[in-house]
Image (spheres, grey):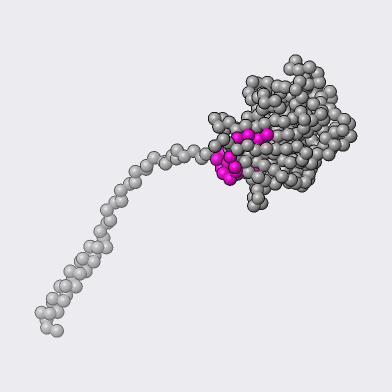
Amino acid sequence: MSRGAARGLVAMLGVAAVLGAAGCTATEPPMPTPTPSPSYVSTYVPPPEYGIAPLTGEQIEVGALTAPSLAAKVDNHPSARPQVGLDRTDIVFEELVEGGLTRYVAVWHSDVPSVIGPVRSIRPMDPEIISPLGGIVAYSGGQQRFVQLMRSAPVYNAIHGQSDTASTFYRGDNAPAPHNVLVKAPELIAQHLDLTAPRQQFAFAESLAAASATKEGRPTSAISLVFGGSATPVWKWGENSQRWVRFMTGGDRDMAASGEQLSAVNVVVLRVPVQVISSIPTTKLIGSGEAWVSSGGATIKATWSKRSLTAPIRLLDANGVAVRLAPGNTWVELVPLAGSVTFSRPAQ
């Protein structure tokens, strides 16, 4: 290498060294100090949890219905009408008794009036009706053998004339005795809050439009029932109210003491065997048979079954699928095989 070339190389290396030294000693520009922003506050409010009322299928907040149900043996003798609180029931079962008359097992849970009645004596089929509900049963007494059957059921027996009902049962001025035994319903329930709420008794749809009968049934304008010579009630579809309204034998409107006509969202008709034992018509409810479910102005054919004392009634359609009732109150008509049921179609 020539001397001139060597001097050039040295010069280049010197510049590089200077640049390298400068890079090592330079400082980075300071990072800006972050400015804190306000914390995010969510305005979302989670919706309340909902369940369904076990006896009506209506939407309720979870934990809203924890009290036991109250079933009562309600009189349906002409002298007992109009009954008190019967228009605010969750479920009513109508059954044949002596003399071709009917009597009710009425059940309150989601809407409890201040007074119910008049209550009458128990019958041998009532344990099969009431046991699936648990809770309380109120009645005025009865033949000892029937009272013992009811006392053996898994429900609290509140009986007129006993010391534990002295503050909740009384004779009113609504009708002559024996059709005037009334019950202070909220007070009676409050004495037994250790009992559990009833379990769900039927399958329910989320709305009237989604109920099995409404969707798949045949249009129906009236349901005519024959229990016996003195009991031939009729249910008619109310297009405006979207409910079935009840008429008594003879065609008069069936009214409650409140002045409201008795009505139902669902009418369930079960054809049941009735055996007369010592002059007492006795409905046999453990078994199975024909049924019809009417909701939304239409009726679907079904099969009913009940496998044990405490099992609820199951309703299945022709395909073996559970029939879904509309949310709301239900009347269950236990029509004897010797009686009849007729469904009328709307006029064309």
Task: State the image coordinates of residue 73 (x, y, percent, origin top left).
Answer: 77, 29
Q: Position of residue 307 (x, y in %)?
A: 77, 47
Residue at 63 percent across and 23 percent down: it is: 260
Is 264 situated left or right of 288 in this image? left
Q: Position of residue 283 (x, y in %)?
A: 80, 38
Instruction: Identify the residue at horizontal 70%, vertical 34% (top origin).
Output: 225
Residue located 76% across and 28% down the image: 230
Q: Nearer the viewer, residue 250 or 192?
A: 250
Q: Work out whether residue 202 or residue 36 is closer to the camera in this orientation and state it.
A: 202
Q: Is residue 113 visible?
A: no
The magenta segment:
202-224
Note whether 230 is above or below 297 in the view shown: above
Q: How many numbered callouts?
A: 0
* Quarter where residue 110 is shown: top right
* Quadrant in which the N terminus appears: bottom left
Eyeballing the image, is 251 above or below 305?
A: above
Between 73 and 185, which is closer to the camera in this rendering? 73
Name the side, left or right, on which 243 lies relative to 129: left
